[in-house]
Amino acid sequence: EAGVTQFPSHSVIEKGQTVTLRCDPISGHDNLYWYRRVMGKEIKFLLHFVKESKQDESGMPNNRFLAERTGGTYSTLKVQPAELEDSGVYFCASSPPGWGEQFFGPGTRLTVL
Amino acid sequence: RKEVEQDPGPFNVPEGATVAFNCTYSNSASQSFFWYRQDCRKEPKLLMSVYSSGNEDGRFTAQLNRASQYISLLIRDSKLSDSATYLCVVPSRAGRRALTFGSGTRLQVQP
């Protein structure tokens, strides 16, 4: 069974540009999460989708970040405009309906110059 | 005070050694706890879940002390392949699925 996939694996952009990250959850997983780890800090929660609905977006840092999950399948996380402090690794995770284990994707390493 | 605190290490131990990590958490209402393992530049992977006083899986034992609000992970007979960062993870708030991660404890098992 395929795991959580994320694209791209790496992205290098300049400050002020826009970047869109994509996450494909495990098939059948209604729950989809975004987390990020900035340099030297612990992994932090960003938001949680249940199917296409945002269940919890308490971790979103500011309105430069926009997450969508149209149709309840894959999700995108757009950063516009990107700032230097947005650099880090963005992880996506998914879990089945209910309170199951969260399976993490390999992450997208974002570098903002 | 951080929600989840861990000793960052590194813990350098020889093969075959027993090593224990501790983690303290601040939310006394937490009901479930997790240890994740993260290899260098890889994603976190669930190692163990702890819902009551403890859990054991082969060489790994997790124990929970609710009164003192700490969780421990014991690894017996360490293998070279156990070298990784071990993350203590707690649900952020009751009823929410967001996870709060500790900063991790790095383990290096040496031959």
Image: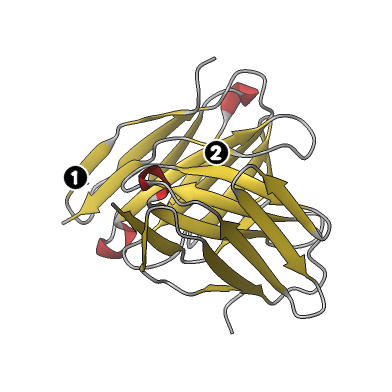
Instruction: Give percent across and percent down for residue A53.
Output: 69, 37
Mark 2, Cα crowd under 10 Å, few <14 / some 14-19 / many 20+, is: many
Q: Name the kind of residue labelled 2 in the image.
A: Ala
**For residue B32, above or below residue A6:** below
Instruction: Give percent across and percent down for residue B69.
Output: 74, 76
Left or right, A30 with respect to A94, comes to right
Could one spot residue B102 in this view of the protein? Answer: yes
Residue furthest to the front: B16
| Residue named by callout 2 | A93
Between B49 and A64, which is closer to the camera in this rendering?
Answer: B49
Residue at 58% x, 43% y: name it.
Answer: B46
Residue furthest to the bottom: B1
- Tell me which corner region of the image, top left, top right, bottom left or bottom right, holds residue B26: bottom right
- How many numbered marks does the figure carry? 2
| Residue named by callout 1 | A12
Residue at 23% x, 48% y: name it.
Answer: A17
Q: Which chain is disc 1 placed on?
A: A
Left or right, B103 with respect to B25, comes to left
- Tell me which corner region of the image, top left, top right, bottom left or bottom right, holds residue B105: bottom left
Q: Which chain is disc 2 placed on?
A: A
Mark 1, Cα crowd under 10 Å, few <14 / some 14-19 / many 20+, is: few
Label 2 to label 1: alpha-carbon separation: 22 Å
